[in-house]
Amino acid sequence: MRITLPSGTAAELVRPDGEPSMGVVLIPDIMGLRPLFDEHCERLARDNNWAVCAFELFAGREHLSREERMIAAKDNDDDRILGDALAAADATGCDRVGLIGFCMGGMYALKAVKTRRFARIVAFYGMIRIPGHWRGPGQGEPLEALAQGDPSTVLAIIGTADTMTPPDDVEALAATGATVVRYEGAEHGFVHDPERDVHRPADAVDAWARAVAWLSD
């Protein structure tokens, strides 16, 4: 069901039948909250007995196209987005809460380490250093945020052919103590959207299984 977080940001909250085993916050990719992520929330809640809450990254700007969002990303503010992540965690009603993020959401998953709210975090191909055209006054660097929390809580799913996560950045992430799983030849976004040309079904199944196991541990 659609809810509104205290900031006014729209979110999708799905609870399982009965008492959830834990909560999970899901941060979407750059295109934000949409039917694809409603389906992910429903599936993760149903299959794992989790309370799952996803929220919109571009709150109040949902009308923006992908190209417009790429430009507007520099205006995003970590305090607002991480605040929404914490509010989404509260909305699950669970003490133990994990976090999953995809693409831009994966970058914010890395930044969320510094909040120390999330027991385990999975970053699907999240940018490890902020792309130059996304840098703005409200944007902190993911590696700096990791240093303020416990990087060992992080599982990073990375494709070796992903230009958004170059090898030097991946090595820097691994050096923090985060667990990095590399999928040979996979490009950016190869897991979460079956409609994309870069989708790799077998790798996606494996990556989802790893993510669920990581969060459930």
Image (cartoon, rainbow, N blue to C red):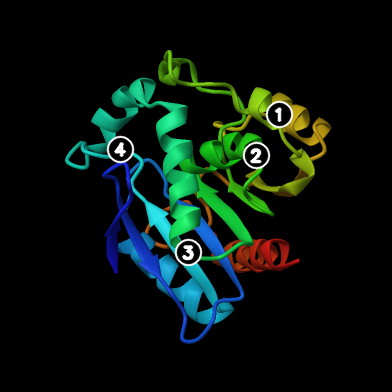
The alpha-carbon separation of the residues under discs 4 and 1 comes to 25 Å
Lateral position of residue 38 relative to residue 99, left or right: left
Judged from the image, the secondary structure of the residue bearing numbered disc 2 is helix
Q: Residues within 10 Å of mark 3 (few under 14, many from 20)?
A: many
**CB under 8 Å between discs 2 and 1:** yes
Residue 136 in the image: above or below residue 102: above
Disc 3 residue type (three-letter): Thr
Q: 19 or 135: which is nearer to us?
A: 19
Mark on residue 113? 2
The alpha-carbon separation of the residues under discs 3 and 1 comes to 25 Å
Query: Residue beneath label 1, please?
Result: 148
Within the image, what quadrant is residue 120 found in?
bottom right
Query: Residue beneath label 3, please?
Result: 92
Between disc 2 and disc 4, the foreground one is: 2
Q: Say how many tags the image has.
A: 4
Q: Pick out the residue farthest to the left.
A: 63
Disc 1 residue type (three-letter): Gln
Decide if residue 193 is in sight here. no
The alpha-carbon separation of the residues under discs 2 and 3 comes to 18 Å
The residue lying at 56 percent from left, 31 percent from top is 163
